[in-house]
Image: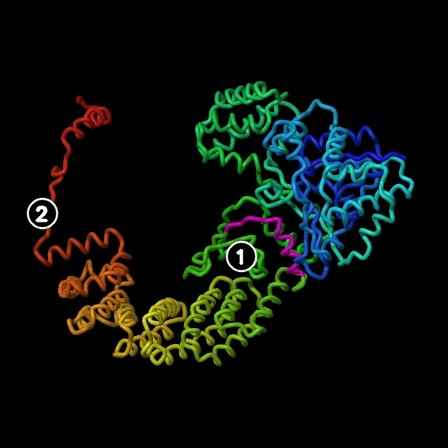
């Protein structure tokens, strides 16, 4: 009976290649792999042709999905190659790490040992970068013997002087030894163990007594854990993603493992392709020169072949011309990469996840790690179905697709623009959402019902109504509408009613394209508008400046919302504004805003507006109040000052009459108002104001600002273009 300990780094092409070669040589009759034992039943699925790494084992606590952990594998992961060998050879593959059931109960699933043993070995080898040292001596080498004996010797030496391991590491290694003893008792003759290099000395014979290991493991709490396979990405294997066992260059390692010949030339050709996709000038000559530079650097550094440091230097110097932005693009697209793996349908999935996969396949929505834009035409059944799915996922807190608010909530109803990007972490969110239902639609409906059942603020209820219509959750809509009507009737706060009304008004338009009956929804919105119109005058009586600013925003929102509720609702709202505009107790900011809205609606003509503006800006009115009125009135734009000379004259006269000692006090308010105007508007107002005072500048002739010497320099070029003699 022999046991072979193959110490590896969790993700590395050299380690993976060495493991595959050693296993083929040893022909073990069982393979033990560092990983959660709950996944033993899933090991055989790695032989499925539909299983394409990068993938990950997802383990989560059955009673609380927030306790979850991933064990990722790429094609260049030694553990993956061990799994593939075992399934191809027909021998058992078992995971031997501390069970996830214990790790979740202990809350140690994220625990890692302190310090980096590779750093000490790298320093001994004259390297200041452990990653580069490991890449040089293990991952980039192709013609060397498998380094397992050397690695075991190095780790043994490091562990002789180590400080005591933390408790989590002791438990892990005690359990690994327990599995190894059990495997030996079962009669297996040739046992191969694939584990992190650091653990090799702890698994070497002679082992501690079984009693000693049991004392470490005794009394460990347990929680039921569930395992499955999920797709993963190269980006999530990278160190930059926060993954503790990550590597800097998953894309480069994938290339090293999958490319047999001309590794440097093929890589730099791919780099050239990425740059050309961005319309950057990269020729074949550039690639040839970059290959020469990378090989030369490798020779000078004593390497048998160019590694990542050499090809990166050649890329930056030759293909990117020293441009950091272009070099970062190559790093993101190739060195790290965003390859997304696949898992077959035979992998056990929660019903909700299976429903999403089936629905996405039917709608031809492919899960991709790179963001891409998706335009949906809601007049087409396929567009409506896709929109419905993405909105349902949004309700479940799974933002596979994100859309701008303007794209969903604009007055147009026929188009939505989404940005799709799939994150592996959504797999956990799917598991968590499965408690709400077995399909995406039923789960989303349950979430909406739970929202309104908790007596949330009125605005949240109207948002739930909007979600029901966007996501086509017809089963939940009656309950949500009942809750909305009840909350609206009981809420006497006009500001809350005004805040809730716009989303409700937007929701009424979905019946136009989505085929949803919104008659009852319009009734609720109509009753809310009636309450708003009746309660607005007392709600705005005697309010301070902050409240006036808030009500200005609310009035704007409701004013826009009434355009979606029909002519009768619009007329009722404008009538309420007309009554409000006649109240002397209205704050100047809000008064100016209401008058502007009435003028834009053709309910106040220019003469009446000029009269009201003049009253607000008379010398007897505090300049600060006048400035607030001006701010409210002109928040809708400055075209009135451009086209109506009477209003411009009123403003000009008022500004000229403000005493100097007061002008500095109102200047910030004036700046806030006039600073919001566009450049052309400011220029046009200045020109019109100059004509009022008779100081308009003389019109410039086309040649007034002509620079004769510079113009003469351009004449030969113009002559060439025109085919004339200079």
Determine the residue positioned at 14% across, 57% down: 689
Callout 2: SS:
loop
Q: Which residue is mark 1?
A: 387
Q: Is residue 193 left or right of residue 545?
A: right
Q: Is residue 151 left or right of residue 284?
A: right
Asked where in the image residue 478 lies, by quadrant, the reply is bottom right
| Start-end of magenta stretch | 419-434
Asked if one can make out residue 241 in the rendered structure from this viewpoint, the answer is: yes
Q: Is residue 39 above or below residue 586?
A: above
Name the one closer to the observer, 411 or 57: 57
Asked where in the image residue 706 lies, by quadrant, the reply is top left
Between label 1 and label 2, give the one nearer the viewer: 2
How far across and how far down the image is residue 504, in percent? 46, 69
Q: Quadrant of the C terminus?
A: top left
Q: Which residue is mark 2?
A: 698
Name the one closer to the observer, 140 or 84: 140
Q: Is residue 47 above or below residue 256?
A: below
Q: Is residue 655 left or right of residue 385?
A: left
Between disc 1 and disc 2, whose residue precedes?
1
Q: Is residue 430 magenta?
A: yes
């Amino acid at each position: 009976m022999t046991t072979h300990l193959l110490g590896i780094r969790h993700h590395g092409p050299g380690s993976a290649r060495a493991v595959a070669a050693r296993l083929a040589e040893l022909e073990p009759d069982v393979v033990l792999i560092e990983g959660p034992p709950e996944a033993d039943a899933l090991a055989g699925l790695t032989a499925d042709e539909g299983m394409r790494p990068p993938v990950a084992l997802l383990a989560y606590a059955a009673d609380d999905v927030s306790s979850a952990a991933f064990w990722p594998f790429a094609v260049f992961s030694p553990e993956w190659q061990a799994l593939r060998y075992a399934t191809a050879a027909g021998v058992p593959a078992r995971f031997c790490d501390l069970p996830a059931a214990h790790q979740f109960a202990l809350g140690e699933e994220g625990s890692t040992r302190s310090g980096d043993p590779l750093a000490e070995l790298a320093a001994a080898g004259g390297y200041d970068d452990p990653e580069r040292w490991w890449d040089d001596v293990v991952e980039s080498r192709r013609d060397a013997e498998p380094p397992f004996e050397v690695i075991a010797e190095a780790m043994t030496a490091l562990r002789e002087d180590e400080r005591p391991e933390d408790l989590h590491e002791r438990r892990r290694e005690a359990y690994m030894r327990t599995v190894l003893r059990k495997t030996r008792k079962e009669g297996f003759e040739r046992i191969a163990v694939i584990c992190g290099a650091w653990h090799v000395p702890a698994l070497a014979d002679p082992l501690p007594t079984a009693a000693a290991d049991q004392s470490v493991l005794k009394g460990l709490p347990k929680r039921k854990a569930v395992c499955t396979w999920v797709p993963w990405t190269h980006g999530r294997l990278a160190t930059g993603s926060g993954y503790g066992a990550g590597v800097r260059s998953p894309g480069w390692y994938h290339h090293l493992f999958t490319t047999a010949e001309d590794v440097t030339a093929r890589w730099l050709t791919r780099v050239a392709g990425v740059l050309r996709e961005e319309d950057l000038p990269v020729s074949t000559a550039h690639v040839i020169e970059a290959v020469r530079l990378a090989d030369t650097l490798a020779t000078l550094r004593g390497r048998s072949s160019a590694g990542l440091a050499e090809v990166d230097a050649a890329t930056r110097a030759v293909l990117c011309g020293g441009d950091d932005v272009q070099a970062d693009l190559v790093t993101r697209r190739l060195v790290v990469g965003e390859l997304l793996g696949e898992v077959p349908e035979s992998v056990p999935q929660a019903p909700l996840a299976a429903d999403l996969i089936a629905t996405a396949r039917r709608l031809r929505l492919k899960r991709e790690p790179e963001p891409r834009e998706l335009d949906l035409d809601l007049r087409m059944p396929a567009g409506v179905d896709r929109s419905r799915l993405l909105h349902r996922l949004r309700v479940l807190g799974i933002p596979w697709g994100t859309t701008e608010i303007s794209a969903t909530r604009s007055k147009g109803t026929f188009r939505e623009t989404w940005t799709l990007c799939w994150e592996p972490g959504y797999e956990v969110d799917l598991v968590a959402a499965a408690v709400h239902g077995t399909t995406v639609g039923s789960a989303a409906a349950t979430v909406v019902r739970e929202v309104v059942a908790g007596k949330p603020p009125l605005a949240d209820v109207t948002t739930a109504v909007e979600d029901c219509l966007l996501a086509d959750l017809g089963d939940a809509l009656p309950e949500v509408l009942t809750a909305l009507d009840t909350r609206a009737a009981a809420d006497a706060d006009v500001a809350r009613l005004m805040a809730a009304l716009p989303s409700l008004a937007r929701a009424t338009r979905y019946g136009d394209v989505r085929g949803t009956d919104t008659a009852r929804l319009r009734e609720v919105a109509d009753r809310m508008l009636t309450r708003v119109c009746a309660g607005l005058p007392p709600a705005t009586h005697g309010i301070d400046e902050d409240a006036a600013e808030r009500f200005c925003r609310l009035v704007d929102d409701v004013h826009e919302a009434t355009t979606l509720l029909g002519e009768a609702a619009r007329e009722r709202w404008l009538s309420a504004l007309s009554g409000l505009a006649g109240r002397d107790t209205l704050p100047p900011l809000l008064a100016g805003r209401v008058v502007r809205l009435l003028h834009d609606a053709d309910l106040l003509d220019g003469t009446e507006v000029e009269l009201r503006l003049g009253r607000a800006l008379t010398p007897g009115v505090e300049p600060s109040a006048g400035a607030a009125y001006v701010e409210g009135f002109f928040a809708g734009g400055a075209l009135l000052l451009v086209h109506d000379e009477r209003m411009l004259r009123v403003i000009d006269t008022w500004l000229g009459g403000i005493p100097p000692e007061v002008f500095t006090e109102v200047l910030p308010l004036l700046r806030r108002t006039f600073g919001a105007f566009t450049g052309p508007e400011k220029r046009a107002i200045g020109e019109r104001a100059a004509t009022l005072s008779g100081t308009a500048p003389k019109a410039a002739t086309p040649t007034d600002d002509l620079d004769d010497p510079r113009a003469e320099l351009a004449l030969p070029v113009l002559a060439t273009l025109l085919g004339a003699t200079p």
